[in-house]
Image (cartoon, grey):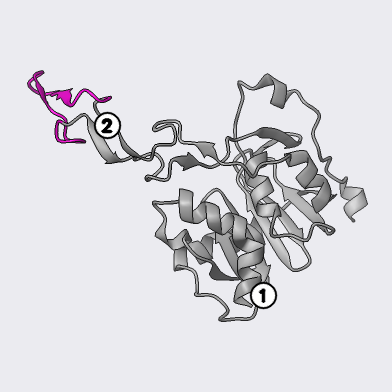
Amino acid sequence: MAEEIDRRLGVMLGWARRFARYESALQAAFEVRALGRTWAVASNGSGAVGVAVDAGAVPAAQATVQDVLAKILEKTPGPHRATATVEGLRAWCGDCAAEAPCSHCHGKGHDVPCRVCDGSGACTCSRCELDHDCGGCDGRGRVETCVDCGGRGAQMPAPRAGLLALGVIVDRVLLWGVLQALPADGAVTVTWTDDAWDPVVFFAPDAWAVVMPVRVADREDVVSSVPLLVAASAAARA
């Protein structure tokens, strides 16, 4: 079971371990109980994916994480719904596997200019208006480990905004990551609300995925594009 969980959740677990460095609770798969079932979940903080498991297969989630995800799965979905294939959604996302070099250290990871003083080693005091040794680097101008990437030299693949549905803009990279846990030949029910900040939820028979939307009002090419999904009418759902 552990190997199967790692295989299905591998992409999101990898992103969480490398790029969610401030969230120790996300460094491994955890158990969430919702919808009357038990799920092994991986999350990087912006997206999450769960696969059905037996109780006790992975450690229980922290209480706050359990409450947040249970609320999303049980109370947020709808009222808009559409059916899509996992294969079709993956094709829309494109190839998103390649990680990007860190924009601050350019892939070095270590011995990089200090973010606080921009490498000068000095900062101007807001009280006395005199220059002092920078507290971020002790006046050296450089730091041992890049604070942006934690020394990894890489960041998650660069975001790719896409219009999933009318008024719903998501990062296709994040969506690609969660979709890796769902069967490629399967179908999902996609649900979303009219609130641009509510998560988009994807339901499969024995799995689910959640992605948070993004706002890119200045990206006219995204906002004015044709939505991938069109919500089924209320009559069609009845």
Residue 223 percent coordinates (x, y): 70, 25
The quadrant of the image that shows the N terminus is bottom right
Question: Mark 2 or mark 1, which is nearer the start of the sequence?
Answer: 1
* Circle 2 residue: 114
SS at circle 2: loop
In the image, 99: left or right of 205?
A: left
Q: Is residue 44 visible?
A: no
Residue depicted at x 65% and y 65%: 7
> What's drawn in magenta, residue-wise?
118-139
The residue identified by callout 1 is 37
Asked if the magenta segment contains residue 130, the reply would be yes
Occupied quadrant, residue 142: top left
Q: Percent from the top left, x then y, of residue 231? A: 83, 43
Badge 2 amino acid: Cys
Q: Depth check: 67 or 159 in front?
A: 159
- Tell me which secondary structure the magenta stretch mostly adopts: loop
